[in-house]
Image: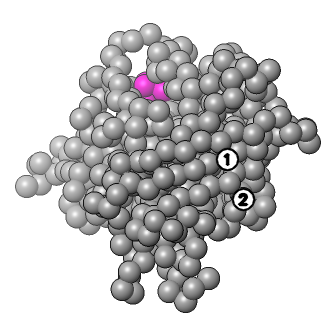
């Protein structure tokens, strides 16, 4: 690797008293109800970094993440619904009940360590987070995007832009205004960094992220739940519940028991998980003048067709001692060849090319379709060969390492 590339891996990843008394009483009623039977409900999955020769096979798992002052017990209704509807993937709950008052970053770190311990970073992970659980789900998906392949993200009544109740807190973490509540203020540094690095960068769309707000929520306003680009939905507090169980704050937590919310969440996860993608990978052009960050994907369209593609997340070119974004340069041709095998037998070779516009980041190679593939269930092995011209030099077509081999499981 050329000297100029060394040590630059992180480049992509950097881009009065009466009033207080009334507030404290409200906080005790709303945030301090850490009942044992409290019910809470709450996005894209992880693939452990594997040798270039082969990536671990993806299988599907849902991770439920509870919120402030709650326990994994809040997911019993959701787990019952998923089981009744014959969800085929694994269902896991992250338990951090004793640490919910800690800063969001501390619990994000705990979630990441737990994912590793449970062996989930090699699977297609779908995060479903309720309230604060949605925030730490977003944070772990963003901070570890190069090590996780996330299938989908669902946040239920999450204060994605802050909680108006938290805004009443003085700027000193104590009591009901603990460190977690401080982080959920609408102007908190934690939320600013999270939203700047995700929402403002176009990370969310209607295919990978779903948010749900509930009317008359006593803790989070509907506008705070929405994420730019995501599928943003709203449910009435009087909507039918799948279970009659009770727990936690009446409206804010009841969203996890709403039949339509559970149905939409499961359908969203199933649709999102027709696509399997590798972790983010870096490929360099000949001479190291160009570098691109990609994911290699295989899609089951639900109609016995497979579709292979490479998604270009970011491209940079080297000039004068620094890396630059190629905005304004001509679009460069992308070419992809996919050799698809199953059970050791080669089935088909697909190839195609495309020329993106000058908006390089987010480009997708020509989708390679294999119609009528005689059923998509099982594990498929795909050897991808990717080439790219430019974005600056028209001879910089050789990309290395090539080819890349990945396995994808549908079932």
Contact, mark 2 vs mark 1 (Cβ under 8 Å): yes
* Quadrant in the picture for residue 146: bottom right
Where is mark 1, residue-wise? 337
Helix, strand or loop at mark 1: strand
Query: Residue 222 magenta-drawn?
Result: no
Q: What is the residue that sits farthest to the bottom in this orientation?
A: 3
Between disc 2 and disc 1, whose residue precedes? 1
Q: CA distance from mark 2 to mark 1?
A: 9 Å
Label 1 crowd (10 A; few <14 / some 14-19 / many >=20): many
Residue 374: which quarter of the image? top right
Q: Position of residue 256 (x, y in %)?
A: 48, 27
Quickly name the residue at label 2: 403
Q: Is residue 113 left or right of residue 361?
A: right
Image quarter in which the C terminus is found: top right
Q: Position of residue 222 (x, y in %)?
A: 26, 32
Main SS, magenta residues = helix
Outermost residue to the right? 344
Q: What residue is rendered at 50% in x and 61% in y?
A: 389
Residue found farthest to the left: 16
The magenta segment: 252-256
- Looking at the image, is 318 positioned above or below residue 155? below
- The tally of labels here is 2
């Amino acid at each position: 690797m050329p000297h100029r590339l060394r040590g630059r891996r992180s480049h992509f990843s950097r881009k009065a008293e009466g009033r207080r008394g009334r507030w404290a009483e409200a906080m005790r009623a709303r945030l301090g109800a850490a009942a044992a039977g409290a019910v809470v409900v709450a996005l894209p999955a992880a693939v452990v970094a594997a040798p270039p020769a082969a990536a671990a096979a993806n299988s599907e798992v849902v991770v439920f993440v509870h919120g402030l002052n709650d326990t994994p017990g809040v997911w019993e209704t959701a787990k019952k619904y998923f089981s009744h509807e014959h969800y085929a993937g694994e269902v896991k709950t992250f338990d951090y009940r004793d640490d919910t008052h800690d800063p969001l970053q501390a619990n994000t770190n705990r979630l990441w360590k737990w994912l590793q311990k449970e062996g989930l970073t090699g699977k297609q992970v779908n995060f479903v987070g309720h309230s604060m659980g949605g925030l730490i789900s977003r944070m772990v998906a963003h901070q570890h995007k190069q090590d996780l392949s996330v299938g989908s993200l669902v946040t239920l009544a999450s204060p994605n832009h802050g909680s108006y109740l938290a805004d009443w807190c003085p700027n000193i973490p104590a009591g009901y205004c603990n460190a977690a509540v401080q982080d959920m203020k609408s102007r908190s540094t934690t939320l600013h960094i999270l939203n700047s690095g995700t929402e403002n960068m176009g990370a969310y769309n209607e295919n990978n992220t779903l948010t749900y707000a509930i009317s008359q929520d006593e803790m989070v306003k509907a506008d705070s739940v929405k994420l730019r680009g995501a599928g943003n939905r709203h449910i009435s507090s009087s909507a039918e519940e799948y279970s009659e169980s009770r727990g936690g704050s009446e409206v804010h937590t009841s969203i996890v028991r709403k039949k339509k919310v559970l149905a939409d969440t499961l359908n969203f996860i199933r649709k999102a998980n027709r696509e399997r993608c590798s972790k983010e990978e870096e490929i360099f052009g000949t001479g190291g003048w160009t570098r691109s960050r990609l994911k290699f994907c295989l899609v089951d369209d639900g109609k016995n067709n497979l579709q292979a593609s490479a998604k270009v997340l970011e491209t940079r070119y080297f000039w004068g001692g620094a890396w630059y974004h190629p905005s304004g340069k001509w679009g460069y041709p992308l070419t992809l060849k996919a050799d698809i095998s199953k059970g050791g037998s080669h089935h088909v070779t697909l190839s195609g090319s495309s020329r993106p516009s000058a908006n390089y980041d987010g480009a997708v190679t020509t989708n390679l379709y294999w119609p009528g593939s005689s059923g998509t269930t099982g594990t498929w092995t795909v050897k991808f060969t990717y080439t790219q011209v430019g974005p600056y030099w028209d001879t910089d077509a050789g990309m290395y390492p090539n080819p890349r081999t990945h396995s994808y499981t549908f079932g």
